[in-house]
Image: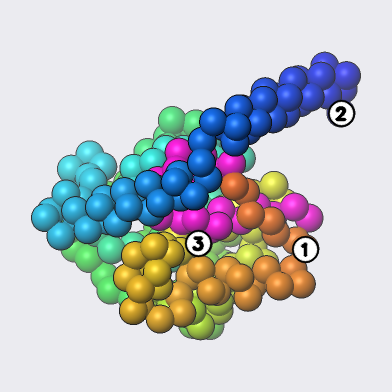
Amino acid sequence: MTLKKLLRSIKKEAKLLRRVVYHRLFINPKLEEDIVNQFTKLYFHSYIFDKVPRWLGVPAIKCPLDLWIYQEIIFEVRPDVIIECGTADGGSAYFLASMCDLVNNGRVITIDIKGGKDRPEHKRIRWLVGSSISGETVDQVKKLIRDTDNIMVILDSDHRKEHVLNELRIYSKLVTQGSYIIVEDTIVNGHPILPDFGPGPMEAVEEFLKGNSDFSIDKNRERFYLTFNPRGYLRREK
């Protein structure tokens, strides 16, 4: 690291520390947590009333603040391939491909057990139909990537713990150093929504990280408070 980069890094850390100290001196952490949890519940359940975000007219069942974080990561990491498990209407894949357009790099491989005729067309998107954890699907994905590709992964398919844990074990091996595997909807099973869901993404993340020093939780990606992915932004450190 050059001296200029080192000084820039120190300055950035000092600003962050100043904000953290100020925040903790004047804001009650328990009150903050309660407010965030209540608003998360309010926002999540607003989807019942068809308040689903849309990207260029296509439903994208994501928290918009998470999508903002995604574009930051894409700009910083410059992934050559983004693997998305869970396609639904294709709005999130369309968003990711649009971000790749803006940085002039990358393509999206999106996987779902269901096909879809009305999904948007985009030259950077490859649609795969199948289970994200089946050997056949994983083989297809591996054939579409190169050893030199910088790879980012987003998990948003079946949210049951065992399925997410299987995805983590499979796709984490493809993530390159400095990039991310993002586990979505860690808010279910009472974190803070859908308390009766049963073990889900949050529990999968906790088990995956036990004894795993290759990945760390990047809490800075949760700095806008509202996120569907608390503790779900996992950065590959080595």
Q: Tell me the CA gap for discs 3 and 2.
A: 31 Å
Label 2 residue SS:
loop
| 229 or 176, nearer to the observer | 229
Which segment did they paint magenta? 220-238
Residue on which disc 2 sits: 1
User: What is the quadrant of residue 85 in the picture?
Assistant: bottom left
Closer-to-camera residue (108/177)? 177
Q: Going 22% across and 45% down the picture, which residue do you hit?
A: 54
Residue 183: mark in rendering: 3
**Residue 229 lies in the magenta stretch:** yes
If you read the primary sequence from the N terminus, does the residue marked by circle 3 or circle 1 appear first? 3
Q: Secondary structure at mark 1?
A: loop
Q: As shown in the figure, which amino acid type bears the numbered disc 1? A: Ser
Query: Which class describes the residues within 10 Å of circle 2: few (<14), some (14-19), or many (20+)?
Result: few
Of the image marks 3 and 2, the number of the one nearer the N terminus: 2
Q: Residue 147 versus residue 68: which sits nearer the camera? A: 68
